[in-house]
Amino acid sequence: MARRASPEINAGSMADIAFLLLIFFLVTTTMDVDTGITRRLPPPVDQPDDVKIKERNVLNVLVNKNDRLMVDGKPGDLATLKDVAKRFMTPVVPDDPSRPETEMKTIDLLGDIPTSKGVISLKNDRGTSYDMYINVQNELARAFNELKDEMSQNYFGVKFDQLIDEDKIDAINDAVPVRVSEAEPESIGDK
Amino acid sequence: MSKFKTKKGKGSPAINTSSLPDIIFMLLFFFMVTTVMREVTLRVKMKLPQATEVQKLEKKSLVSYIYIGPPTNVAKFGTESRIQLNDQFARVEDVPEFVAREREARNEADRNFITTSLKVNKDTKMGVVTDVKQELRKAGAFRINYSTLKGKAKK
């Protein structure tokens, strides 16, 4: 007795079902990648002002509630902040009392190199707008990134963000430490 | 005469659509894999600032978000910037508990690598942001990320 062949399933609506699902996922999907400026907060201290840093090693950046800048005691400008920060963080080899101190560090892959002991101290008012704060952070980050790029170009011949070898990345990060310190907030008046 | 002319005429032959489902399925799987469901409903207005030196946030599973901005429902909540944790408004004092709960939800091995992404509206004043940062410091969540869009910073 011949087995009766099962009738073929009609697959014509398969496409419709798939379309339905596809449209659902198309609508719900979000393809945004989160980007941002990454920073590390300092651990809490009980008594601030414990650590004394020599004055020549600190670049004070203040932002007031009207979003105006004060860099190193003088009114500053966002357009020049990067260059000021970059010059400040560039190690000077014959010691210059008007510039931050330099110390020799031994770093794998780079050997003995001078690194700056400078610290950029960023202080903002409670009334500073977040937009301005991010702009300042961005300019400071740009200064450090350019220094890293130069260092990387000198030693490895490629830009910092094109380095693949973890050891090389660590070496550059050691040589150009990102030292942006945020002062303990002080409440001056309200808002 | 026209003995060999067929009745059918010159209409173009039907396109074979039997592989259409396969193509659609392929697209479907692509979107299924890449899709990320939105977890929270935003209750604050989000207009992120722009910056040029941005880094990508990696390992999304280790990121917890704090939203700060003016409420969307102005009539009910006013225009003062508020903090949103998960699905609801919160006060600054609630931040440590939020951090603790986020930490609880992760693997033990990953707990030290949790990054807190601050999504802050660009018009917000720094006061509330500073308060949140102080709470994060106290709670031991040191890795933070100021969420910004990639683009040219103004001014």
Image (cartoon, coloured by chain):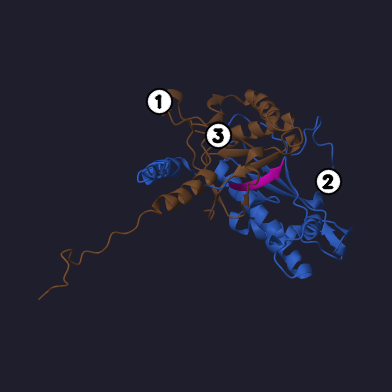
- Given this view, does label 2 or label 3 mark the residue nearer the observer? 3
Task: Give the residue furthest to the bottom.
Answer: B1
What's the residue at 52%, 47% (across, down)? A32
- Please give the residue where the numbered disc 2 appears in the rendered image: A53
Could you give the CA–CA distance between mark 2 and mark 1, rounded to whole angstroms? 50 Å
In brown, which chain?
B
Image spot of residue A121 (x, y percent): 73, 46
Say which element carries label 1: helix
For residue B68, the mark is 3
Image spot of residue A14 (x, y percent): 39, 44
For residue B75, the mark is 1
Three-letter residue code for mark 1? Ala
Snapshot quadrant of residue B13: bottom left
Give the overall secondary structure of the magenta segment.
strand
Say which element carries label 3: strand
Three-letter residue code for mark 2? Ile
Image spot of residue A127 (x, y percent): 58, 37
Task: Give the residue furthest to the left.
Answer: B1
Image spot of residue A181 (x, y percent): 74, 44
Say which element carries label 2: loop
What's the residue at 62%, 30% (across, down)? A189
**Parent chain of label 2:** A
Q: Is residue B25 visible?
A: yes
**Parent chain of label 3:** B
Task: Give the residue furthest to the front.
Answer: A1
